[in-house]
Image (cartoon, rainbow, N blue to C red):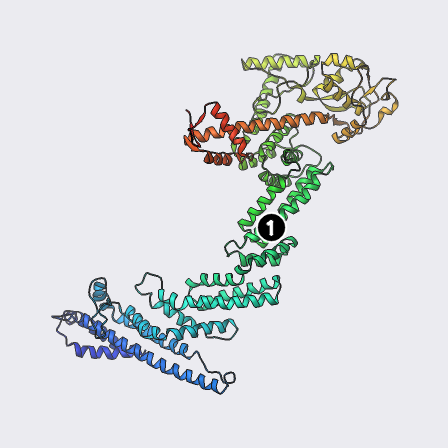
Amino acid sequence: MTTETSNLRPQPVDFNIVWQTIRGTINKILCLSYVSKDEWGDRFHDIYKLCIAHPESYSDRTYHETRKLLESHVKMIYAVSFVLFCLSNLKYIFSFVFQSVKENPSNMNDLLNIYYEKWQTYQQAIEYLTLLYIYLNTQYVRKFRHGNNELGDDNNRSNEKLMEINELGAHLWKMEMIMPLKDNLVRLLLQAINDDRCGKPQNHNVISTVINSFILMERFGNKNKPVLYRELFEEPFLIATSTYYSHEARLLLQNNDCSNYLEKVLTIMNVEKDRLYKLIPNESHQRVIEVVEKCMLGDYLDFFQNECRLMVKNEISRDLRNMYLLLKSIESGLKIMVDQVELHIKEKGLEVIKCIINSKDDNHIQTFIEEILKVYYHYLHLIENIFSGDKIFMSALDRACTAIINYRENTKQPCRSPEILSRYCDNLLKKSAKNSSEKEMETKITEAIIIFKYISDKDIFQKCYSKMLAKRLIHSQCISMENEECMIQKIKSVCGYEFTSKLQRMFTDVKVCDDFMVGFQTHLENSNIKLPMSFSAYILQACAWPFSQTPVSNFNIPLIFEKAVHEFEHFYLNKFNGRKLNWIFNVSQGEVKFLYTKKLYQITMNTFQIAIILLFENVDELSYEEIQQSTSLNDEQLQRHLQSFTDLKILLLNNPSSPLSSASSSSSSSVASTSIQANRQQQSQPESFPKSTRFLLNKNFASKRMKFKINVPPPKEVQQKEAEQQNASVEEDRKMFLQAAIVRIMKTRKRLRHNALIEEVINQAKQRFNPNVPMIKKAIDSLIEKQYIDRYENTDEYHYMA
């Protein structure tokens, strides 16, 4: 222990003697000759002794002597390599003179092979020396490398700072080996890569190692980019690549059509990427690929644009897939394809939609939805399979579907899609003989929401849907409340809570009414009150339900109803003092049993129809004037409801002078059981009944169905008037929405410029409808008049007035 400790202490050392032994071992290492473990340990200790020598350290001298030794070694390697290269060139020249290059080719890559072998040996030797000199590196070089300590050798390199042994070795290789040979090395490397591209076998390991040696020269202690590699090899390589593939692209286009050209370019790109992986450092891969893409694709975008139209039109999957894979990495390369795909989808969709909209087929609603979904799913799968679901193509599909679904023949008229979709949803969610299973129902609801997302005028859909939902709820026509709530939740996920708030309040009202009616029935039982018929009522919030509170006609309640109505009003007003009930008889309905017929029929009628048929309970015949006097219905309502009875031959006309008289036994003909059939029958009937018309109860009435409903579709004039009223209501709602949005924005921002305000209003409104700028300007002017906001003088800036 004592001896070892003393050896580690500073001692006087004869530098020349110790260095000679170190020098011999270094020469062995540089040649990768065998060095025993004991010798390695002794040399390690010798370098340590020189660094801590007393009275003066020999660290500086050791470093400089090592540098001279390495420099001399590298110069010797260069000399040998140059001589061998010259001999190789002479061999090539002689073979060329005797015109026997092809028969006896000279190996022009001898320099690369020589360089590769020498570099492999030298690189390994430097790694060993770095381990041997670890103490010098850590305690001497690193300590002074950032200071002013400079080299002072015999080669006048006084401006070079100290470097660790691995850095020094790389630096000397760069200066003494690479720089003198750089032109020949790069020329041979480029030639070898070019030959590899042409299919001539090459030693990839040699090429890759030589190229990587350029990077390793600057990697040690250098945080900057490898400038030597970039200037020495990468820039000439990119130029050579551009030249090669520009020529290759011209040849391919001359001999191939677009389809084959794409196939071959795709193969070339894959082969080139594989070659780069084997030969070229990773940092150059992207730049090389960009050069290849520009030469073979970017320079021919106009050509691809012309070919792309036919590919998209004919939906040639293979060619579109290849074009996508090749153009996706080129800036703006896919714009051509995206535009063509969007245009193609739009054309195909509009082709179908125009035919359906102009069709008079009764099933046009179902057909409309099915055809749109067919177009959507077809191109969705096409985009997923060919374009890997790329977002820019999905956006193109969205834009195309938006244009298809919001198509309108007359730009002055509103789009029909919101109304058609709402009617489709009504047919889907309403009880019928063709109701789907739960799984199918969920799928169809999801598909309906897909179309709903693309509708621009979502507020029109909301108006139509709320009316139909109201009828389903109050007439108990919903298949299930779960399906209804599922639809509303999906609509809410698209448009937000505010959009569906009224729809959800309608559900709340129905649930509350069920509980309220239980209380009313309990009240009747406790009070010993018996009603002449079964009775139920819905209490609806006027602001949530889409029913007008203005009655469509004066109406006298039948006597049989009066007691039930009176008792219900009395019970309700006792519970909720100060409220007012408005009865909406035009949307009420009930079931009437025909006891006077041979069979028992249960017929669903609206309240006006019930009032009319009850008049025949004690008499068999009544005149038009008598019916009108008893019911107080106006002519328009009375005519339509009497027509519904005569169409089904429940009532017969007893007017001998009229061609409509049909009190014969033919009245036993079967009843039309659907609203479509009823509409067809009405077309054969006169538009109105004369005041003198008398109606006779058909006691021989018969029908194939024991239970059915009498529908009273409104005449076209009423439908048109309701459509106009709905459009006016939508326009008014939009004005109010825009004003509310402007106030919200200005209340938050306090001050805002005109264009910024317009943009924010559009962003808030686009979930419901697409507002135009003039509409927003009118809303701004209206708010200025109401003094909600004000405009600064001589500016386009507004400020909020609290």
Residue that badge 1 annotates? 341
Say whether residue 175 is left or right of residue 13.
right
Residue 526 appearing in the image: no
Residue found at x 71% / y 35%: 433
Residue at the farthest front position = 794
Query: So how many labels did they put on this image?
Result: 1
Q: Position of residue 282 (x, y in %)?
A: 42, 63
Quadrant of the rendering where the N terminus is positioned: bottom left
Q: Position of residue 692 (x, y in %)?
A: 82, 14
Q: Is residue 436 above or below residue 77?
A: above
Say whether residue 30 is left or right of residue 628.
left
SS at badge 1 = helix
Tell which of 504 and 214 is nearer to you: 214
Q: Quadrant of residue 473?
A: top right
Q: Position of residue 53 (x, y in %)?
A: 15, 71
Which amino acid type is marked by label 1? Val
Q: Is residue 274 above or below residue 759?
A: below
Say whether residue 96 is left or right of residue 681.
left
Q: Quadrant of residue 399?
A: top right
Tell which of 461 and 621 is nearer to you: 461
Residue 709 appearing in the image: yes
Say whether residue 772 is left or right of residue 355.
left
Quadrant of the rendering where the C terminus is positioned: top left
Residue found at x 48% / y 30%: 742
Residue at the farthest left position = 55
Residue neighbourhood size for the residue with mark 1, other residues' Cα within 10 Å, grouped as few (<14), some (14–19), many (≥20): many
Residue at the farthest bottom position = 98
Q: Position of residue 156 (x, y in %)?
A: 22, 72
